[in-house]
Image (cartoon, rainbow, N blue to C red):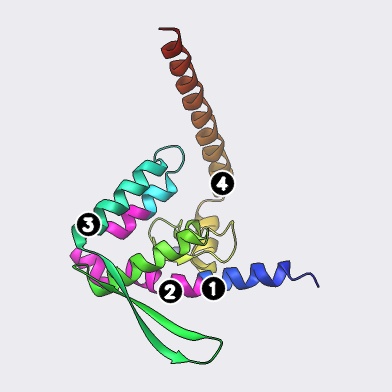
Amino acid sequence: MDNTHSHLHNRSYFGEFAAGPLVDWLNSDTRRKKFPKGDAIERGLELNAGIPIQSTQHDVESYIARLVAKSKFAVAPTVESVSPSQWTVKWTPVGKLDFRQGMALIKLLQLADDGLLDRVRKCAKKECGRWFYAKFIHQRFHDLICQQQTFRDDPDYRRHRADSQKRAKHDAKQRQKRQLEAVKKGGKR
Ligand SMILES: [Zn+2]
């Protein structure tokens, strides 16, 4: 039996479920008040979004390592329910982070490990900016209303977006070319 589809579906469902505490934290008033300029969790997402152009694997590794060291972050397991085949284990954050921020970090790492971190996005409608988990790869808005309002107010939105994506691709290619040239030059020395 081909269960690829149901596997994908489960994975995406799991992602949405795991993203709950992360998205809740990102949208929370606590975060807005305590960290008006953004917090460690948002910075982690920004780093991820910048790969491979603005950030690298090294940036992410050292960022998480520093964050863990600075906040004395650790994760403690508790067993919640038990059957012969399965235990339900809850992982809770320990350390100096706000409890909900710590939970968000656990979920961020879990989603990253499952290859779903880029599904956590900020609504593309500027005045909204709500964080959400994208059920579909191309989803840019947290709900249909934000999408419809953006398309109504800016009928050229799709074209602008396509243009800016093209530009970003072009810039990335140029940067790569320059890097290659620099390496070649370095080799001749
Ligand atoms: Zn929105």
Quadrant for the C terminus in the image: top left
Q: Nearer the viewer, mark 1 or mark 3?
A: 3
What is the CA distance from the residue labelled 3 to the residue labelled 4? 46 Å
| Residue denoted by label 1 | 14
Q: Nearer the viewer, residue 83 or 162?
A: 83
Identify the disc placed on residue 20: 2
Q: Name above or below for residue 90 compared with residue 64.
A: below
Left or right placement of residue 168 versus residue 59 in this view: right
| Residue denoted by label 3 | 69
| Residue denoted by label 4 | 156
Residue 146, how many percent across, how many down?
Answer: 49, 64
What is the CA distance from the residue labelled 2 to the residue labelled 1? 10 Å
- Estimate how packed mark 4 is, as few (under 14), some (14 to 19) or many (20 or more) residues with alpha carbons within 10 Å: few
Quadrant for the N terminus in the image: bottom right
What is the CA distance from the residue labelled 1 to the residue labelled 3? 29 Å
Q: Which residues are magenta?
A: 16-44
Name the secondary structure under disc 2. helix
Name the secondary structure under disc 1. helix
